[in-house]
Image (cartoon, rainbow, N blue to C red):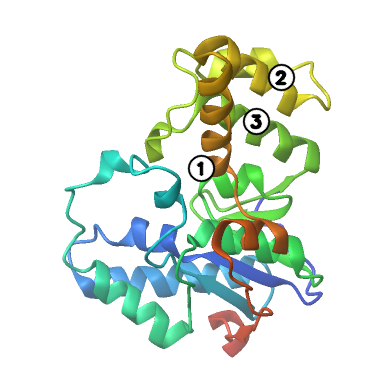
Amino acid sequence: MSSIERLPRDGNICLIDADSLIYYEMHKPTLEEALYGIDERINSMLTACNTSMYVGFLTEKNCFRYGVTSDYKGNRKGKPKPIIFDSIRTYMIQKYNFWGVSGFEADDLVSYYSYTDRRSTIICSPDKDVLYQCVGMHFNYQKNDFLHTTPDEALKFLWKQVLMGDSTDNIQGIPGVGEKTSDNWLKNRKNDFEAFALKKYVEKFGMVNGIMEFHKTFRLVYLLKTDEDVWRETQIELPPLQVDTLQTEEELW
């Protein structure tokens, strides 16, 4: 579905991955240009999704994944953020009421509320983990396109990530296993993904190390979805979703 074909106005709530918004705007030459870009992207999202309702999520400190392994995102250590990073973040918090929870990444909050909230939600993110692991309607604001991810597609993507890891976040997976190999392994499988992936880990690492590496990788790539997921990893109960509203430029006209 193209973004030109706007969705019907039926109470949709945009769940916005605000981390990706910062990422795409923080390299602008000036803070003014970055903030203008933030406003434009949020307005275009709400316009395309034909709604004024949204929630924006930010990553906070102490993500539980660093407790799984200190190597998580180790490839990013020592790389300074652009000087306007904190100003953009503060702007989104103050103007749009975006928020986060200590211990969680924005991806997890998007995933959790898209799964647990019973209202009609549209996930707004260009991030591949969110796009392909979260079931439901998506608006990729980088490509200006809608996408619907099915439960089967999300499940297969999750286990593909378990097998191959994710170099973006310094998650190793099984050495030597890339996208082509994992796709070939999974393409004809239906519902035995977990047992199959565990078998491959044991074959590579041995029984004890294989089981440990398997569970570590799963915890790193899996986006939290249920109250049980959240409590297992953080011992926190997340609050009910509070929705904000914003009139788009089109509505103001």
In the visual, does 192 lie left or right of 143? Answer: right
- Amino acid type, residue under disc 3 in the picture: Trp
Q: Alpha-carbon neighbours of circle 3 within 10 Å: few (<14), some, or many (≥20)?
A: many
In the visual, does 140 lie left or right of 115? Answer: left
Badges 2 and 1: C-beta atoms under 8 Å apart? no
Q: CA distance from mark 1 to mark 3?
A: 12 Å
> Residue at the location (53% across, 56% down)?
107
In the visual, does 159 lie left or right of 44? Answer: right
> Residue at the location (51% across, 22% down)?
209
> Residue at the location (50% across, 15% down)?
205
User: Mark 1 highlights which residue?
Assistant: 220
Q: Position of residue 192 (x, y in %)?
A: 80, 24
User: Mark 2 highlights which residue?
Assistant: 196
Q: Quadrant of residue 25?
A: bottom left
User: Mark 3 highlights which residue?
Assistant: 159
Q: Note whether 249 is above or below 181 in the view shown.
A: below
Asked which secondary structure carries label 1, the reply is: helix
Q: CA distance from mark 2 to mark 3?
A: 9 Å
Q: Note whether 10 is above or below 218 in the view shown.
A: below
Badges 1 and 3: C-beta atoms under 8 Å apart? no
- Amino acid type, residue under disc 2 in the picture: Phe
Asked which secondary structure carries label 3, the reply is: helix
